[in-house]
């Protein structure tokens, strides 16, 4: 039976919520910018007016100001966004129990079983669009299709406050002319590889022999070909935003086997740099640090411990990871790979109970240092600023987050 | 064994010793109460961390001893009519409990396997009024640390310098220190008593002006109240040196009626539900009044409390529970609250006297 899948995308989510709470900003270009403790933030979201002026998500504030001198910068209230995300989810859940979060502002809904009750997918989509506007005061774009990939593409086609339908009959006209980079998971690097093969549009991809793609891109090529042809059959699972990000972690196989504490300490340092940066980027702090150790026999253990308080400070994560390691490893075998994962996440803008057992001023300063490092790297690249301890240790020093990209697994569970 | 005692006295005794009985243990006998009839009728609970003994008035017809499952024994006795209860040990370790028209036969456990309470070496001791000790524990217990990463702070420090007894609890976010000179000891000492033991002791100490004799060795502490005895293991390690932590210089001070401040904070805290756990209330210290506000998804609250203020204006956040905990146990009509900065400690003290110091860290908002 043909499925009816909706993809609902809250338009300019952060900025819309801010404008709702600050009506005086409604007619001005507004950007929500990160790194609240430093003033070097980047644009996390912008409203429609700022968008028209060319402000882009991810660019530095000064770049945005160049294009749009009147830009109003507001600081993010992640707490508030979480709440609105939840409110929207409650509305979706009145139509189906199969609601899958994809980020804070996007959800897939499988309404196949609900069409007898509520009418066609398109009718439900319009109803949701109206209700979000009336009940929450923000707008949503809804895509309706027969698989998740096309539903997501559809929601991107018309914005804001709109519904777009892609059917099995018209996907060739609607989807195929789109540039291939619009397809979920076709990033810069995959896009470049595809372009090298002469594949520019999604239609090109769909009509390329799947064997060729598999040879050039591996298993991934096959998956993308299935996406482009609308053969995606991934189910919509019940996933909330909170459960989506349970932890943030990285692991790395060392270029040579690790043989001593000093080696392990350095590798944890490198991993913590990446994990810390990702936590800060998502504005999350974690309470638990988990490490994984793979020895030269490929045997694998994980150990975890709690931090004294929620943190996204690189140094604290690295120190904790190494502390756990020292209690769990006796060097009877050498180590091949290490990993760090931070879990028990909370949004970082919540109130922080101070402790007199910790040097809170030093913690605040360390947060500021980490934010500054992040913005330097954002502008000048990862290697622009480095830990002195890693300076002459080239084999360990890598930008874990960018050079070892693993695609988000959440879609393929 | 054959004893007769009043239901009420028996139930009270069970209730006291149950404080030291583990409800779930791998060792079956630890889920039991040891009852012994000799010269006296005595009940004992012991979970190996904490042991409680209680003597109960009874008429002893035949001596003996047995261990009975604590939960079952308690449930039965609590529901018996107000009358005399007969407890008799029969063959096969069967215990018969009879009261008016009720009769129970329970399987008992031989008492030999019940852990003996370690004999305490009488190294240090002091005498103090039970009510006073109860209040001192009550005023500090809530600040005991619950984080297992800091095991030594999971107890309260009891230190005696020859004239003054201090009880101190610290969880890192606050510090509670209660002192008294109204106790008689031999020589100075310092021990750390587990918070769990104090939590039970507070319920066992009587709200009457009776004396308790406290004896401490290197590993154990005994609170001897005559008919009731509570003995706990001590925590090992060195307690935090708290002397330098409490600040002496403040930017702002205010004095306020305790009950008024408590009610205002409790009302403002209504806005903070479990969903907003960790959310702070805001203090705005300003001239002749203290403005307390809170704002969450539910709505916002605005409270004004008249105060006498001295020093700079200040705005800072607090976890409301860290304030209500202390305001509930302070009996003085007026308290003084002194502030350093919005990221440094604040101190609460009764306006009169020097018996109590409470230090609390603010919340960064």
Image (cartoon, rainbow, N blue to C red):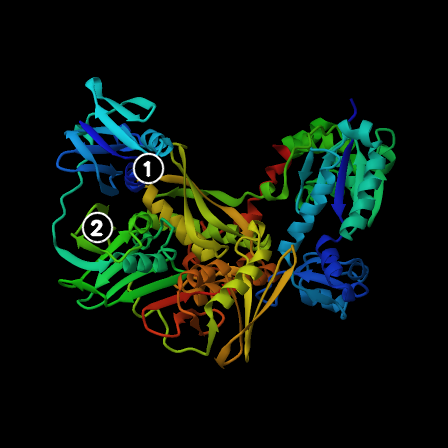
Instruction: Check the image and report above or below for A265 versus A303.
Output: below
> Residues under labels 1 and 2: Cα distance?
58 Å
Mark 1–mark 2 contact, CB under 8 Å? Answer: no
Q: Nearer the viewer, residue A84 or B20?
A: B20
Instruction: Check the image and report above or below for B217 versus A182.
Output: below
Asked whether the viewer can see residue B239, the reply is no
Total number of numbered labels? 2
Q: Quadrant of the N terminus of chain A?
A: top right
Q: Quadrant of the C terminus of chain A?
A: top right
Residue B280: % across, % down: 54, 61
Give the chain letter at badge 2: B
**In this rendering, position of residue A143 left or right of residue B356:** right
User: Which mark is in front, 1 or 2?
Assistant: 2
Q: At x 55% / y 76%, what residue is drawn?
A: B289
**In this rendering, position of residue A117 left or right of residue A248:** right
Number of other residues with Cα within 10 Å of mark 1, as a class: few under 14, some 14 to 19, many 20 or more: some
In terms of secondary structure, where does tag 1 sit? loop
Would you name the residue on which mark 2 appears? B225
**In this rendering, position of residue A256 left or right of residue B40:** right
Asked whether the viewer can see residue B334, the reply is yes
Q: At x 37% / y 46%, what residue is drawn?
A: A324
Q: Nearer the viewer, residue A106 or B268?
A: B268
Residue A94: % across, % down: 74, 37
Q: At x 25% / y 38%, what residue is drawn?
A: B46
In terms of secondary structure, where does tag 2 sit? loop
Q: Nearer the viewer, residue B173 or A239?
A: B173
Give the chain letter at badge 1: A
Residue B91: % across, % down: 19, 18
Residue B205: % across, % down: 29, 51
Q: Nearer the viewer, residue B280 or A143?
A: B280
As drawn, the label of residue A333 is 1
């Amino acid at each position: 039976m043909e499925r009816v899948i909706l993809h609902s995308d809250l338009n300019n989510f952060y900025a819309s919520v801010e404008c709702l709470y600050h009506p005086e900003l409604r007619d001005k270009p507004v950007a929500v910018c990160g790194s609240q403790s430093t003033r070097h933030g980047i644009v996390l979201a912008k409203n429609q007016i700022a968008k028209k002026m060319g402000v882009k998500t991810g660019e530095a504030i000064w770049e945005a100001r160049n294009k749009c001198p009147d830009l109003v910068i507001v600081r993010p209230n992640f707490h508030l966004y979480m709440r609105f995300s939840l409110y929207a989810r409650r509305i979706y859940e009145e139509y189906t129990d199969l609601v899958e979060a994809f980020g804070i502002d996007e959800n897939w809904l499988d309404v196949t079983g609900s069409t007898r009750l509520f009418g066609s997918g398109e009718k439900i989509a319009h109803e949701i669009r109206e209700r979000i506007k009336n009940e929450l005061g923000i707008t949503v774009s809804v895509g309706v299709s027969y698989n998740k990939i096309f539903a997501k593409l559809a929601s991107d086609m018309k914005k804001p406050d709109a519904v777009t339908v892609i059917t099995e009959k018209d996907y060739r006209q609607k989807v195929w002319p789109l540039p291939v980079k619009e397809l979920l998971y076709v990033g810069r690097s995959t896009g470049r590889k595809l372009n090298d093969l002469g594949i520019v549009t999604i239609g090109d991809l769909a009509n390329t022999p799947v064997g060729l793609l598999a040879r050039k891109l591996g298993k991934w090529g096959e998956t993308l070909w299935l996406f482009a042809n609308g053969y995606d059959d991934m189910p919509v699972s019940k996933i909330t935003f909170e459960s989506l990000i349970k932890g943030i972690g990285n692991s790395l196989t060392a270029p040579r086997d690790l043989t001593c504490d000093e080696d392990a300490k350095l590798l944890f340092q490198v991993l913590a740099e990446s994990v810390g940066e990702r936590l800060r980027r998502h504005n999350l702090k974690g309470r638990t640090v988990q490490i994984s150790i793979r020895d030269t026999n490929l045997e694998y253990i994980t150990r975890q411990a709690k931090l004294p308080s929620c943190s996204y400070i690189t140094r604290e994560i690295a120190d904790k990871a190494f502390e756990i390691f020292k209690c769990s490893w006796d060097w009877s075998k050498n180590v091949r790979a290490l990993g760090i994962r931070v879990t028990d996440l909370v949004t970082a803008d919540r109130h922080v109970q101070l402790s007199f057992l910790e040097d809170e001023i030093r913690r605040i300063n360390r947060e500021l240092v980490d934010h500054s490092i992040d913005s330097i790297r954002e502008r000048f690249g990862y290697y622009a600023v480095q830990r002195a301890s890693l300076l002459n240790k080239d084999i360990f020093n890598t930008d874990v987050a960018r050079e070892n990209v693993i695609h988000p697994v959440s879609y393929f569970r | 064994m054959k004893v007769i005692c009043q239901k009420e006295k028996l139930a009270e005794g069970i209730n006291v010793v149950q404080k030291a009985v583990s409800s779930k243990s791998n060792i079956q006998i630890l889920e039991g109460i040891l009852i012994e009839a000799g010269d006296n009728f005595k009940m004992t609970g012991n979970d190996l961390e904490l042991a409680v003994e209680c003597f109960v008035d009874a008429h002893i017809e035949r001596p003996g001893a047995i261990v009975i499952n604590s939960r079952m024994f308690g449930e039965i006795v609590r529901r018996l009519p107000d009358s005399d209860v007969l407890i008799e040990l029969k063959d096969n370790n069967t215990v018969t409990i009879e009261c008016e028209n009720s009769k129970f036969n329970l399987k008992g456990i031989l008492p030999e396997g019940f852990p003996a309470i370690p004999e305490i070496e009488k190294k240090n001791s002091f005498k103090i009024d039970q009510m006073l000790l109860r209040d001192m524990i009550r005023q500090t217990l809530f600040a005991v640390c619950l984080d297992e990463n800091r095991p030594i702070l999971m107890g309260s420090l009891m230190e005696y310098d020859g004239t003054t007894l201090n009880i101190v609890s610290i969880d890192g976010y606050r510090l509670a220190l209660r002192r008294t000179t109204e106790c008689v000891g031999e020589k100075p000492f310092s021990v750390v008593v587990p918070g769990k033991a104090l939590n039970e002791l507070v319920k066992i100490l009587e709200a009457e002006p009776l004396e308790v004799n406290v004896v401490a060795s290197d590993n154990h502490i005994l609170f001897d109240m005559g008919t009731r005895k509570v003995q706990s293991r001590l925590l090992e390690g060195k307690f935090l040196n708290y002397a330098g932590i409490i600040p002496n210089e403040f930017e702002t001070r205010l004095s306020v009626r305790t009950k008024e401040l408590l009610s205002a904070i409790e009302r403002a805290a209504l806005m903070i539900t479990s969903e907003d756990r960790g959310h702070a209330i805001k203090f705005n210290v300003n001239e002749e009044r203290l403005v307390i506000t809170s704002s969450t998804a539910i709505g916002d609250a605005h409270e004004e409390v008249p105060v006498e203020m001295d020093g700079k204006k200040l705005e800072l956040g607090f976890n409301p529970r860290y304030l209500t905990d202390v305001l509930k146990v302070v009996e003085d009509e007026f308290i003084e609250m002194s502030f350093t900065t919005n990221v440094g400690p604040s101190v609460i003290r009764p306006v009169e006297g020097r018996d109590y110091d409470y230090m609390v860290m603010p919340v960064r908002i």
